[in-house]
Image: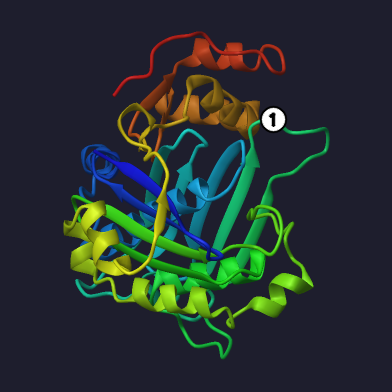
Amino acid sequence: MSEIHKFLFDGLPVRGVLVRLTDAWTEVLRRHASGSAAGAYPLPVQNMLGEMVAAATLMQSNIKFNGSLILQIFGDGPVKLAVVEVQPDFGLRATATVIGDIAADASLSELVNVNNEGKCAITLDPKTRFPGQQPYQGVVPLFGDEREKLEKLSEVLEHYMLQSEQLDTTLVLAADDKVAAGLLIQRLPMAGSGNLAGSLVSQANEDEIGINEHYNRIAILASTLKREELLTLDVETVLRRLFWEETLTRFEPLAGEAAPRFSCTCSRERVSKMIFGLGLEEAQSILAERGDIEVGCEFCGLQYHFDPIDVAQIFRVTGDLPPSSEAVQ
């Protein structure tokens, strides 16, 4: 089963999170393989998306935020867009749009950053918004300080975290067709609790970047974790191997009913609003050509069908909800 483990290093300004996604991740892959005409993702796309799912779950577990965290990577390669969304209760979904052929050993830059124009975006979308409030979004390029292409998602996100929180962060990520896993080690902020909205951008945190000897030591230990170990070893074994000389305070793991799980937020109501956004003329044009409007969810594979009567009711009054006919698989 999927699980999240949080821990602190006693007496040191360092915290950690380790996540292992099993059933939640395999359900993402199953939904795509069964709902897509192209079948399963190519191996490099599968592994990149799995690392994104693990990373987004780590980040959601590391902040206090009542809303969804959305991690996106987009660029000019054959993977036009990859998206992961994690809700505050750790319901998650993920998808990738693939256009063109992908080599079996394609790197991150070959997937999404061919001409060094790729981007990584993290959006925090609160469940309840104040009037005029917009989701917070931060965007970083897929290259380093010298415009060198980054070939590890972990490096991209470490750069993002340093910019957004001004806190040192080490990430180790891995995925295959059965497990998506990740380890996050982060230096604690000088005061308060961190979040991804930049509230801790301060001189005190800047002054500590790269120089805290306790964090640096633990980060080096974390970086020795190999991909195969992260994918195959249980959490207890990983933590014991890495930090056997450190004293950890462990928190109750999120497992069982509280564990991360696949969950899609699509609905007939939301699809109806999308059709309304097309405008009556465009909707009628689709009906004239095809007889109905069919919209498939790229995340879960559900197909929503709207006949002429359904569409007429959508446009009857602005904001009207459609009839409650069932989505079909």
Front in this rendered view, residue 19 or 8: 8
Q: Nearer the viewer, residue 47 or 65?
A: 65
Amino acid carrying label 1: it is Thr
Q: Secondary structure at mark 1?
A: loop
Q: Position of residue 210 (x, y in %)?
A: 58, 81
Residue sitting at x 41%, y 39%: 92
- The residue located at (48%, 9%) in the rendering is 324
Q: Nearer the viewer, residue 264 or 291?
A: 264
The x, y position of residue 48, in whole percent, is: 33, 62
Vertical position of residue 147 compared to residue 215: above or below: below
Tell me where residue 257 sits by quadrant: top left
Q: In front here: 89 or 202?
A: 202
Please report the residue visible at 62 percent of the width from the left and 64 percent of the height from the top.
139
Q: Quadrant of the C terminus?
A: top left
> To which quarter of the image does residue 22 belong?
top left
Residue receiving disc 1: 128
**Up-down: is 133 above or below 51?**
above
Q: Is residue 219 visible?
A: yes
Here the colouring is rainbow
- Residue 262 lies, in percent from the top left, at 35, 35
Whole-percent x and y of residue 51?
35, 59
